[in-house]
Image (cartoon, helix red, strand yellow):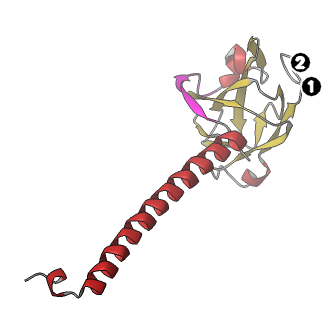
Amino acid sequence: MSEEQGMTPFEAAFHASAERHERVWTFCVIVMLALLTIGTMFYVVRDYGLVSATGAFYTDPADPAREAAFADGKIVRTGPNAYAVYVVGRAWHWSPDVIRVPAGAEITFYVTSADVLHGFEIQGTAVNLTAVPGVVGSVKYTFRRPGVYHIICNEYCGMLHHAMVARIVVTPSQAVTTGTPS
């Protein structure tokens, strides 16, 4: 004899109703969690953008400045709405220390180090790359909003590690000088 068979009609109806309500509430919670996840992902992508690693290649670990692209921190326009930025980390600064790019442009950062490991992190974004001597890592990013973003080193690299800060100035228009920023 099952438990339900021993119930009164009122108890059996109450049990069936409670079970139906539990299923509805469970379904509602699953739908709310799905909407919350999708909404969070939408706002994160909208506010921070998508980051895509583009691969790595190698350079002279002793002096990446021998590579023409890294000679003086170049910013090169590579397409109608695309730029390549070459960044070298060296104790305890980034070169270039000011980068000017337009909002909405696809920026490919090529990052390397001239001495030790550095952490290339653009605050307020999801860009985070390790700068390794002799290796050029790259990452693509599109700044959606104009403003000033700071590049910091997030790997302890020596006693002035905390002072290793550069700026990215994101302008509202396409009026950006190519080549070495001033």
Viewer-side residue, 96 vs 127: 127
**CA gap, disc 1 and disc 2:** 9 Å
Is residue 134 at all visible to an observer of this figure?
Answer: no
Identify the residue position indicated by label 2 in the image. Answer: 177
Viewer-side residue, 36 vs 115: 36
Which corner quadrant holds the C terminus?
A: top right
- How many marks do you count on the picture? 2
Taking the spot 75% from the left edge, 44% from the top edge, the residue there is 92
Q: Is residue 144 above or below residue 81?
A: below
Is residue 143 at all visible to an observer of this figure?
Answer: yes
Identify the residue position indicated by label 1 in the image. Answer: 182
Q: Is residue 33 above or below residue 146?
A: below
Q: Is residue 156 above or below residue 173?
A: below
Residue 140 picture location, percent across and down: 64, 28
Q: Secondary structure at mark 1?
A: loop
Tell me if residue 51 is in the magenta stretch: yes
| Residue type at numbered disc 1 | Ser
Residue 152 picture location, percent across and down: 73, 46
Q: Secondary structure at mark 2?
A: loop
| Residue bounds of the magenta highlight | 50-62
Tag 2: Cα neighbours inside 10 Å, few (<14), some, or many (≥20)?
A: some
Q: Is residue 8 above or below residue 70?
A: below
